[in-house]
Amino acid sequence: MKFPEAEPEIAALALLVIEGLRQLEAELPAPPVSADELQARLDRFNGSKVRVVAANTALRNEHTANDQDLKSLVDATKATLKYAEVVFRDQPSKLSQLGWGPRRDGSSLEAPGEVRDIRIVAEGDTWITLRWSPPVSGGAVGMYKIQRKTKDAGAWEDAGSSVDTVLTLSRQPRGIEMDYRVLAANKAGVGQPSATVTVVL
């Protein structure tokens, strides 16, 4: 037989070994790890697994709440600035007191540059959290596009989008080596893709 690789199968096998050691105690009097010690290790694994699942759930919930808070902040800030642009349409210098400026001619907008420093900051059975740094060149970033493809094959496909420099992608393929990359975009176009990161969930 081949020793299992999946966590549930390993735990199930360990439990069978524990039961077998206890039943065959007379015939296996000096195993390298006793049934009691193996049971203690199984109990520790089960306990830490429960904590990992709870932590991953909490992390996903925090990311969801953070995304919602960011959207609320963006909507409120944009609404306020649009209001100020109307009020001060003949006094554009006053917009600077709000950290803003008059609208530029759309023809002068430039596509963003290349996204930097993409990295994996957390992962689970079917989810992954990516973080990156914004471009240092090009136009202002309107949003980020996250793309994925199978390693060394297939075409890039959109996996998600974000206005922040971090995103958790859920329901990702398991047991497949996947490449991920990020592109910055605005109304003028899409910038050069970032370097790729590879993961097998």
Image (cartoon, rainbow, N blue to C red):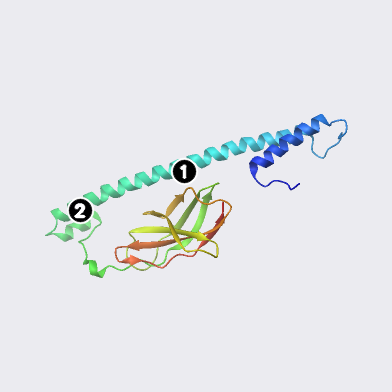
Secondary structure, mark 2, is helix
Which residue type carries mark 2?
Answer: Lys
Q: Looking at the image, which is closer to me, 121 or 94?
A: 121
Q: Is residue 80 left or right of residue 3?
A: left
**Tag on residue 101?**
none
Frontmost of labels 1 and 2 is: 1
Which residue type carries mark 1?
Answer: Arg
Dot 1 corresponds to which residue? Answer: 60
Answer few, some or many: residues within 10 Å of disc 2's Cα (few below 14, many 20 plus, some between 14 and 19).
few
Q: Is residue 148 left or right of residue 188?
A: right
Q: Residue at x 27, y 48 (%)?
A: 75
Secondary structure, mark 1, is helix
Nearest to N terminus: mark 1 or mark 2:
1
Dot 2 corresponds to which residue? Answer: 82
In space, the residues marked 1 and 2 are separated at their CA atoms by 33 Å
The quadrant where residue 192 appears = bottom left
Answer few, some or many: residues within 10 Å of disc 1's Cα (few below 14, many 20 plus, some between 14 and 19).
some
The quadrant where residue 141 appears = bottom left
Q: Residue at x 58, y 52 (%)?
A: 175
Which x, y percent locates residue 44? 66, 36
Q: Looking at the image, which is closer to me, 105 or 21?
A: 21
Q: Is residue 67 left or right of residue 102?
A: right
Up/down of 79 relative to 51, above or below: below
Q: Residue at x 73, y 46 (%)?
A: 3
Which x, y percent locates residue 107? 23, 69
